[in-house]
Image (cartoon, grey):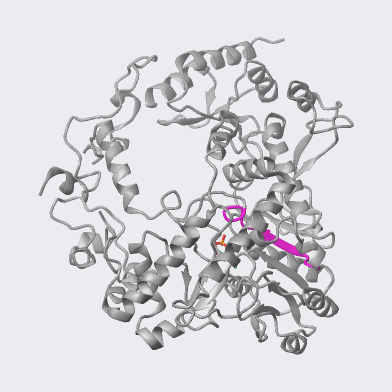
Amino acid sequence: MSVGAEQDTITIFERSREGRRAFTPPREDVPETAVEDLLPDWARRTDPAALPEVSEPEIVRHYVTISRKNFHLDQGFYPLGSCTMKHNPKLHERVAALPGHARLHPLQEPEHAQGALELMFNLQGALSEIAGLPHVSLQPSAGSHGELAGLLLTRAYHADRGTERTKVLTPDTAHGTNPATVTMAGYEVVKVGTAPDGGVDLDDLREKATEDVACLMLTNPNTLGLFDSNIEEIARIVHEVGATLYYDGANLNAVMGITRPGDMGFDIVHFNLHKTFTQPHGGGGPGAGPIAVSDRIEPFLPVPQVVRTHSVGAQAGRWPVEHRRSAYISGNGTGPVFDLDHDRPKSIGKLRGFQGNFGVFVRSYAYICSLGAEGLREASELAVLNANYLKARLAEPGIAEYLPIAFDRHCMHEFVLSGSGAKDKLGIKTLDIAKRLLDHEVHPPTVYFPLLVDEALMIEPTETEPKERLDHFAEAIRALLEEAAENPEIARTAPHTTPVRRLDEAGAAKKPVVRQPRGPHENPGDPGSAQENPAAASGAL
Amino acid sequence: MLRRTAYARDALGLEAINPGPVVREFAVRVPDLDGFLVRAREAGINPGLPLRGVLGEYEDGLLVAITERRTREQIDALAAVAAREEVPA
Ligand SMILES: Cc1ncc(COP(=O)(O)O)c(C=O)c1O
């Protein structure tokens, strides 16, 4: 094997050679006291830590090689439905890395963190405007965390009115996090059916909306990518029994600046800043799931709230920067302009450490500022246009007979096809189609969700894709269906060009091997060998 | 970092809350903590986390963290603030 190929598959530990290094620390500027004089025997390790010793060029090659093994948004089309995998502008990384943003300590007192608090305050204001609801908390760290916050707020709201309710309604198209959140918050999940047009079944809702219902959780457009035009009636039914209406904002990319959840009658909304507002996501990185709420929910918001205690002039927040600094510090003599308000007696408490994921706020705020109100609206319009264009391309003969649209209406930012035709006529399943797409250098859509569509493929192109990418996707689908008519085995055994082939996904979830074994003879990627190794099995390495 | 932290604890000359070995953080008692914080900030330094509110029994406690980013010059500047503190105003 050539050095290149061999080097392609080894770990950073295997690259290690004694004595190599990438960095030489500067000479000590404090007295070079012996370590033995600073730390007693018991606190010093006897063996050196088994850290890799690698030169800088080899480190760079190592991580660049690894990055090429991943499919990522900077590499190709990523129409993962319900995830809004839009382009993440690179400018945001520079803004987030500014020392005043990146090097601020989360425990810095408000007096000395006025810039950060102003950014958070302004982001709250922008999100409030987008949601059409007056109050915002930035604390929750993910959409699902926002959902939990929403149900805790709902409980606090009902408790404050002296009522206790036990059920939460979710449509059968809901994302799995909705019912999971309901259960986690201690409520009982009650499913509401879907009408033939893909919206909420109003009769079913009327029947299930009883006085013991605390909340209805809904996303609009829903996970079929369809806007529910009965939303005002839905809100009326829910409010009539005294329940709250929760908006799962995962699909907000369809409606920014066009309609607002608050105007539709929702009481609580979460945003996925990592979807709609360009925080890079996928792979479990930090996200943010701020919530916006109506007046009646506001007293229960988490602590602390970012507030403006007083204004610094008629045009607060719009002053030239050089004036602002002194204005922050002295204000008008009554303390800092922006502050953290802990004095909220009805609050549900704190939802996480510190103030949330600040870097996410910076990127999202940069996005909102660079697009502005008009730009956000245009982004949503293009997201809807792109989805409808791709839907039309996939309705062409040669594709539609195998992948019929689940609900044949104009869609919003995404749409759902059924792989039922391909399964019956070609003998390939949605999973096979998804895997074969990887060989066309396209990330698969979301598959097998929503659950009510047989062999579902949920496609969300986003506004940042040009027409050529959409066309390429449609052609890739056509090509793989034609190929399957000749030889379905190719799709069934796909992918064929990726660093690893079809994986045992259940095994990967249930028996993951995530540790680097120390010895040269252990194979880190082989679950069998991990099991045979008692130290590895007990996690004792 | 170990050396830098040890150097800082010595240089500050304040009473250590825990006299044991330290790696990168140490807690000290500061007689006039509020005055010290104000003077440190005037010198452009955030000297650490006041322990009141975190650990109630240490009203005058301050947790100082020294990282590899702190230079001797910066540590000496903080020590100068601490030294001035001992002198009654
Ligand atoms: C419709 C819908 N709701 C909720 C969520 C949960 O959001 P998060 O992944 O940020 O917890 C998702 C995310 O995938 C979603 O698609």
Quadrant of the image containing the C terminus of chain A = bottom left
Residue A295 is situated, as x and y percent measured from the top left of the image, at: 84, 59
Regarding residue A347, the answer to whether it shows in the image is: no
- Furthest residue toward front: A397
Regarding residue A378, the answer to whether it shows in the image is: yes
Residue at figure coordinates x 69%, y 47% from the top left:
A375
Answer with left or right where residue A60 lies relative to residue A430: left
Residue at figure coordinates x 22%, y 59% from the top left:
A535
Residue at figure coordinates x 28%, y 31% from the top left:
A56
Relative to B68, say whether A409 is above or below.
below
Numbered-mark total: 0
Residue A289 is situated, as x and y percent measured from the top left of the image, at: 63, 56
Q: For ligand 1, which image quadrant applies?
A: bottom right
Residue A452 is situated, as x and y percent measured from the top left of the image, at: 55, 83
Residue B61 occupies quadrant? top right
Relative to A361, say whether B50 is above or below.
above
- Furthest residue toward right: A314
Magenta segment includes A273: yes
Relative to A473, say whether A466 is above or below.
above
Answer with left or right where residue A289 lies relative to residue A87: right
Residue A462 occupies quadrant? bottom right
State whether the magenta stretch is mostly helix, strand or loop. Answer: loop
Residue bounds of the magenta highlight: A265-276
Magenta segment includes A22: no
Residue A491 occupies quadrant? bottom left
Choose between A371 and A252: the one closer to the eye: A371
Choose between A200 and A104: the one closer to the eye: A200
Residue A174 is situated, as x and y percent measured from the top left of the image, at: 61, 75
- Furthest residue toward left: A1
Choose between A314 and A330: the one closer to the eye: A314
